[in-house]
Amino acid sequence: MANATLSASEESRHESRRPRTSDWRLFLRIVPYARPYGRSLLFSAFLLIPLSVASAVQPVLIGQAISLLRNEPTTYGLLRDVGLSNGLILLSVLLSVTVVFRFGLQSIQGYQVAKVGQQITTDIRNDLFRHVLSLAAQFFDKTPVGRLITRLTSDVESLGDVFATGAIGIVSDLFSIVVVVIAMFALQWDLALLLVLLLVPISALIWYFQLEFRKANYKSRDELSSLNSTLQENLSGIGVVQIFRRERFNSELFRNNNLRYVQAVDRTIFFDSAVSATLEWIGFIAIAGILWLGGSRILNQTLTFGTLSTFILFAQRLFNPLQQLAEKFTSIQSGFTAVERINNLLDQTVDIRDALTTQQLPVGDAAPVGQVVFEDVWFAYKDDDYILKGLNFAIQPGEKVAIVGPTGAGKSSIIRLLCRLYETTQGSITIDGINVKAVSQADLRQYIGVILQDGFLFAGDVQSNISLGESYTLEQIQAIAVQMNIAPFIEALPEGYSTLLRERGTNLSAGQKQLLAFARAAIRNPRILVLDEATANLDVGTEALIQDALERLLVNRTAIIIAHRLSTIRNVDRILVLRHGELVESGSHEELMAQEGVYASLYRLQMMGQAF
């Protein structure tokens, strides 16, 4: 548990050292996801024109109403001609029309953009999940699950906000500001210049706050990933936590992690609030400046009260979208942080890929198949820390071979390399004369059936946990269950093959889960069967039934058995003995006992343990 926490913090520090990608390059990375929805986005962008015009017209209408009431010379001639009462009615109708028109278009645009944002988010999450599943097992050895969950959920949601509330919204706000500025200069250039000049220091200050927010937001997401990793680790290992009374200690670790996350979030809140507060104060200063300059001109009779009122409303129209723009920039900065973290995951190299042209393994029973050859195989999980060293051996078709050795000798690593979950550091592995790297991963793993000691089950029914997405019929599943002598166990479940299993099969015993693992492997009719202490969780009676079924299943099949209980492998054709990643002995049980070597010592130690 401590190792996982350490790896999470190490990855966090590693990410913090990565060079930040420019926002422009990040934006280009997500543009392809928006391309299929180009029409919807263009339609939303087109609505900006009438929306901005309606927003700019409203202050003018209100200013004209005030000028008409005061009979000022800036009143439009049409309004003076129709009279005060009719003019006010006309302005009220026009103002109501613009309000309804604006709100209606805003609703349509908001719905359209939010819908596109969710569609893009879905596409990105699907691609990210597909990419994660294609990564090599070595990647998952060093990456906490909670960190990946954060990328697939929280980060992707933040990225969706870039489209749902950010990108089009920023274009809308910028367009509104441009239209308002043009309208102000057309009406009164000096007052307009005063407001525009205020935008320069505001923009610089907001830009600074946004950069600081970006840094703080990246830090907060790193801390959230670490928090989720700690949570996932403790929930997965709840049995160990409670047995060893680690509740208080782990709670303190979680509290400290949570405190770091809160501190990081507080910093993002500070910079986000600083933007809003700055704009509020600058907005008040702008209105005060308009009142001061406009008021003095009214006293000099060079400006009408209606025009001044229009400019006060224009000031609000100018700073409201600017404030919304800053808020959307905050959302976009969060989105860019998410894009950066998602890119780091998408940029992870898929180390194990199918060759451009693959070869087919032999099928059918016409000729013996299932030969396995390891030739000068070296393998290390970390550089130069070799688990397997110059391994050479051959397993002939139909041969039953056991691999034994002390803990850490490299037994499980052999199986992982054979199934190509990892790549060899040096040397080659062939099956029936074909290098495993030349075979498609789908064909290779169909050809090799693996039964592990801990059979993992997914949430779902028994039938789906045996078929695992393949198109096996219920009749085929029932037939294989009968063949493996486990049909009585399944039929005794509350709903038989339709019995729902909880996550990781927690409503079944370890032995029952193992029985389903046997059926899962057997139904795929593999040519090579790998058993990794597959009967360790079974009681004596059930193990006898399974052994009887295995003897029938292994006819004309190659079997590789990883065994810890040496008494279970006395009848295999050959035993390979590993020590420190090297093959030190090979032969039958009787031959190895006669050699008085590593195997004989291990066997006698186990027999003594059973005697006591």
Image (tube, rainbow, N blue to C red):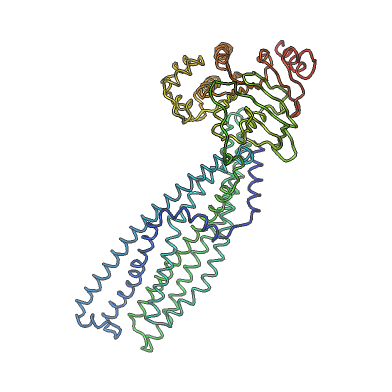
Note whether 136 is above or below 472 in the view shown: below
Q: Position of residue 227 (x, y in %)?
A: 58, 44
Q: Is residue 29 above or below residue 150?
A: below
334 vs 288: above or below = above
Residue 362 percent across, percent down from the top left: 57, 27
The x, y position of residue 301, in whole percent, is 36, 88
Question: Residue 326 appears at what percent x and percent y?
Answer: 48, 64
Residue 175 visible here: yes
Q: Residue at x 30, y 84 (%)?
A: 74
- Of residue 392 and residue 290, the one placed in the foreground of this image is 392
Q: Say how many tags the image has.
A: 0
Q: Quadrant of the N terminus?
A: top right
> Residue furthest toward the right?
596
Which quadrant of the view contains residue 431? top right
Q: Nearer the viewer, residue 201 or 457?
A: 457
Q: Is residue 326 left or right of residue 100?
A: right
- Relative to 239, 120 lies left or right: left
Return the residue found at the far bottom.
300
Quarter of the picture holding the C terminus: top right
Residue in view at x 48 percent, y 54 percent:
32
Q: Is residue 293 left or right of residue 341?
A: left
Residue 230 seen in this snapshot: no
Using the rendered view, name the quadrant where residue 61 is placed. Answer: bottom left
Say whether residue 187 is left or right of residue 465. Answer: left
